[in-house]
Amino acid sequence: MLSYAVRKLLTLIPVMLGVYTLVFVVMQVLPGDPARIRAGPGATAEEIENIRHQLGLDKPVPVQYVLSLQKAVRLDFGRSFRTNLPVLDELKSRYPTTVQLTLAATVIFLSLGLPLGVIAAVKRNSIWDGLAILVSLLGISMPAFWLGLLLIWYFSVRLGWFPTFGFSSPKHVILPAFTLASYGIAYTARYTRSSMLEELMQDYVITARAKGLRERVVLYRHALRNALIPVVTQAALGFGLMLGGAVVVEVVFTVNGVGKLIVDGILYRDYPVVQAAVLLLALNFVLVNLIADIAYGFIDPRVRLR
Amino acid sequence: MGKARREENSQPVTRADAPIAALRPTRSFYSLALAQLLKNKVAVLGGLLVLVEIVVAILAPYLAPFDPVKQDLKSTLLPPLTAGHLMGTDDLGRDMLSRIIYGARISLLVGVAVVGIATVVGVPVGAAAGYSRKLDRWISMGVDTLLAFPGILLALAIVAALGPGLVNVMIAVGIYSMPMYIRVVRAQVLALKEREFAMAARAIGVRETGILFRHILPNCIGPVIVQATINVGTAILSAASLSFLGVGVQPPTPEWGAMLSQSRLYVVTAPHAVTFPGLAIMSVVLGFNLLGDGLRDALDPRFRR
């Protein structure tokens, strides 16, 4: 088991190196001269030259690549162009918000999506099944930012139940977390439904029924347990995807998380911040996926053998 | 009893019915698939939604009652059904309905261009990965790298590098969509190249490239069509998200995501300006999703009735 986990962990190294390289290339292509942006408007040519030297931008690109990689490994991402604070500090202050938002969304999508999928499969072709199908279709097709705006309009503006922006109290969390969870609810309901339907067709279910077990035991103790195995991976994947979705939701609800940091960074051309924040979310994503992989191997021993 | 229970619970499958289909040799695989698709009401609904968008996009100049970019600062944020504005006006007094109609052009263009970019690159690369172990290592690493970015983050980073604009959005979302095609084609080629018909072709001396192009790739068309159909919807959604964030298509272009981005400031006074562009995005994406699901069932012989 441990060797399986370690083996999986090692595969992350080339992936993260690839991610780093890709982000580095993207930053090279970016329009505008970083030294000029850093110097601000009205800087003399000499000042810009100085900054260029300071940032190491006068070195050849491959040298810059190696140097910045060395720094990145030591978590040194330079200073923000906009606030002049170390990028790492910016990330540290923003990251907990994004994680809280994503965790809240995960709790919501699991507690709504899972039961909906299970009921839909157990009571196939019932109203519940129809509801599950409808929810999963709408959830997948609806733009999250639109849902967010509608929720703000109805629950915050018309009913006045929730604040319209910010992230300072539990009340602030509900609407953004639900918005972020919408895709996950849809996806989980759909996935759980088909996974459960598949299990209900298996021979062991017939056996369990044949030997006279109560239907509830057959459904929940036998079928559901097996149906949940692939769902675990999907749930972790959903958590990871929400890190990406958080970008949009944080902008809609003006939540100061990593996602909004990236979008603002792009609009203000604050490249060191964008670079580090994108790396952070990508690392987070692959780590979550890795944990899901390992958990999958843990729950289902058949996977480990591969 | 057991048997009855099993049938009741099983998917609408039908291996038992397969021989019946086999008795109609005059009909090709694709005409059977089409017949199957037309029997699927949900898929037909999806197809209709898609058809409506295509017709609206083509006939936009004839359908739109107003100029989509003409401002009228005397009649801003009018509610629906006033002064000839069926869906009201936006913050600059532009007719919402006309903007939604012209927006169909943009979204369809983005969807088709993205799928074009992603298939033109993704299919050959996926085929190469499926066929050559040496290339597969590098290609799979590249795919893993692209997939390491959660959600639209990759598209966001690329569009940040390229700058805003319609074409750059297409490229960014196109690159973001590629891994799906690479994976689908790779898996398909890996499975097919060991099948009897490929072996048989090899045995009678057909060159490997011939086997790939003549025998294996045609068998990948089905899954790629399914992928492409669903991808049009997700591409439209991703592009709209980028425009909503302000890094995509820029005003005054009537792009649905950009329209929402502008209208969000007026969500209190003019909720209609938020409602309609979102509805437009949702119905189109829903249409492509439903059609794609239907195609998947129709093209997969295991689901054929």
Image: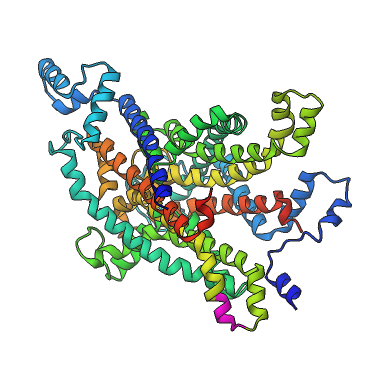
Residue A182 within the segment the image draws in magenta: no
Q: In this view, does A44 lie above or below B115?
A: above
Q: In this view, does A37 lie to the left or right of A238?
A: left
- Residue drawn at (51%, 38%) of the image: B179
Q: Is residue B3 above or below residue A38?
A: below
Q: In this view, does A7 lie to the left or right of B264?
A: right
Q: Quadrant of residue A155?
A: bottom left
Count of numbered tags:
0
Whether residue B252 is visible to the viewer of this picture, yes or no, is no
Which range of residues does the magenta coloring cover?
Answer: A213-219
Whether residue A94 is visible to the viewer of this picture, yes or no, is yes
Give how far across and how far down residue A269 sits, in percent: 25, 33
Q: In which quarter of the image is residue A195?
A: bottom right
Give how far across and how far down residue B140 sits, in percent: 50, 35
Magenta segment's dominant SS is helix
Q: Quadrant of residue B238?
A: top left
Q: Is residue B173 above or below residue A167?
A: above
Give how far across and how far down residue A305 sits, in percent: 53, 50
- Residue drawn at (60%, 66%) of the image: A199
Q: In this view, does B38 lie to the left or right of A55?
A: right
